[in-house]
Amino acid sequence: MDLLLSGLTRELHAASREYARGCVPRNKVAKEEPQIPLPPIFDSLKLERTEENEVDIVVPSLASCAVHLELLEAFKLLQETVIKSNQLDVLFDTLPEKCYITVSRYRRGRYVRQRTLLKPIKKHDSSHQERRKAKWVNFVDYAFNRFSIWAAEIDKSPAAIAKGGRYLAAKFIPPLDVLMIWHSLLMKPRLCLGWCLRSKALWIRRVAFPWDSIHAMIDQSNRKFYLPLENVEVFKRITKLLPDLLESLIKAPENAPVQYHAEPQKSKARFAAIWQGHDVWVDRMCHFLWIRSPAVEFTLQNARERYRQFVDLLASDPSKKLAPPPDIELVWLTHQMSPVSFKKFSKAIMGRTMEHNIVNKDEADQEGLRSTEEAWQARFDTKLQRCLCWDCQNLHRLAEAHFRSDRDRDREPQHLVDAAIREVAHERAVERARRLLRGN
């Protein structure tokens, strides 16, 4: 089937690009638009917290992976908001530079060229967009300080940790910037353990990421994160900090140095190692935008199965450094968000805790991907690397259904390309309309 799909994929990409040129997005998104993903995909979130389900989940559920994608979209939206904020340009001194331009003015019957100082104009400052990204670095530093304060207070609050010390009580869920730092810590298990020991916040190594509560706080239409009023009051009470970091920096910048105490330089260096690669990975996942794909359930289910196979391959030769593709990487890092479950799973299969490094596009990582591809094909007789775009994932879903069906088995597979394009076209138009409304 891989050989057939590789040929169909080339045709699909060409046809999809041609079809997209004539795809005109609507001016607004109607309320009756079907939800993507469909709500039933999140049903298993409730089962994961029931008393009867105390056994560790071997592989992250479909729902957890889907909520993880939602959260990454919220992180990306927060980053874009910070970088584009004109008010933060003033606070962090990233305003466009003033420049002189030569203008012509009509004086005494003739045009005279003279230099005039104008107000800052962004289009004349070619480095402005790059300098604005420094705001995000400063914002993350503030978020790390807030997380340190919040984590210490959670350790002092007996009511914060529920169900045998494995879950955070819903009303103690913090704002998005604090969640983002917690997320980055769990992505690096060894560095996280060192930070927890130094900060005496070992509860982070026991508590699973609260996917069900996070899903309830994310707006399904725009992926914005909204903290409930009860959580706002609890966060203000235990930390003495304002819940919305962005709003507090904009409205009261003079309080920022007083309110958020700077961490020692050594602690900041350690956090830089923890944070390294986080933005790279978030950008990679948001690039695929699987959470909006009509084939999201197929993509995530297939990723979970491939993750099981990848761990088996890793266990067969622990000395090898294998680099997972993005879909397997998503399931792996979703698994790491449940530290106890991930530790038991790793030790049962590998005899040690698995550590994952974010794969960049440098030469060393490309070599790792090639060696992983060879080992995968030798063991499973199928390709590891595959196109993960909406069209191709939908094509794979239709192809599997085609070969399973006795009725369609004799039919030419060429019709799968047309069917894949038709099914994706509507969702692509809706997503374009959403981005136009957001100004992206």
Image (cartoon, grey):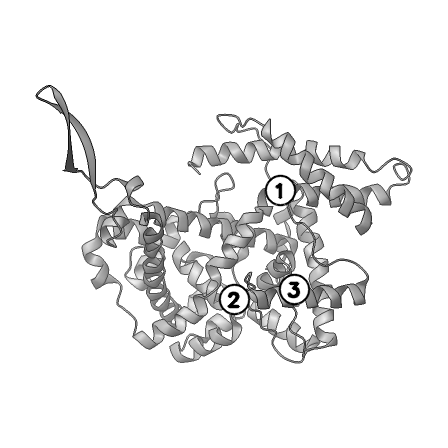
One can see residue 410 in this view: yes
Q: In which quarter of the image is residue 332?
A: bottom right
Q: Count numbered badges in the picture.
A: 3
Outermost residue on the top side: it is 109
**Where 434 falls versus 396 (above or below)?**
above
Q: Count neighbours of disc 1 (C-alpha within 10 A) and say few if under 14, some if 14 to 19, many if 20 or more.
A: many
- Secondary-structure class at tag 3: helix
Q: In which quarter of the image is residue 158?
A: bottom left
Q: Which residue in the protein does label 3 denote?
A: 369
As shown in the figure, which amino acid type bears the numbered disc 3? Leu
Outermost residue on the left side: it is 108
Tell me, for residue 187, which label it has, or none: 2
Instruction: Check whether the beta carbons of the residues at disc 1 and disc 3 lie within 8 A of each other.
Output: no
- Foreground mark, 1 or 3, reads 3
Going 83% across and 38% down the picture, which residue do you hit?
A: 413
- Secondary-structure class at tag 1: loop
Q: Compute the Cα span from label 1 to label 2.
A: 25 Å
As shown in the figure, which amino acid type bears the numbered disc 2? Met
Q: Which residue in the protein does label 1 denote?
A: 293
State left or right for residue 357 relative to residue 324: left
Q: Count neighbours of disc 3 (C-alpha within 10 A) and say few if under 14, some if 14 to 19, many if 20 or more.
A: many
Q: Compute the Cα span from label 2 to label 3.
A: 20 Å
Q: In the rendering, at what x and y percent does residue 359 appear?
A: 56, 64
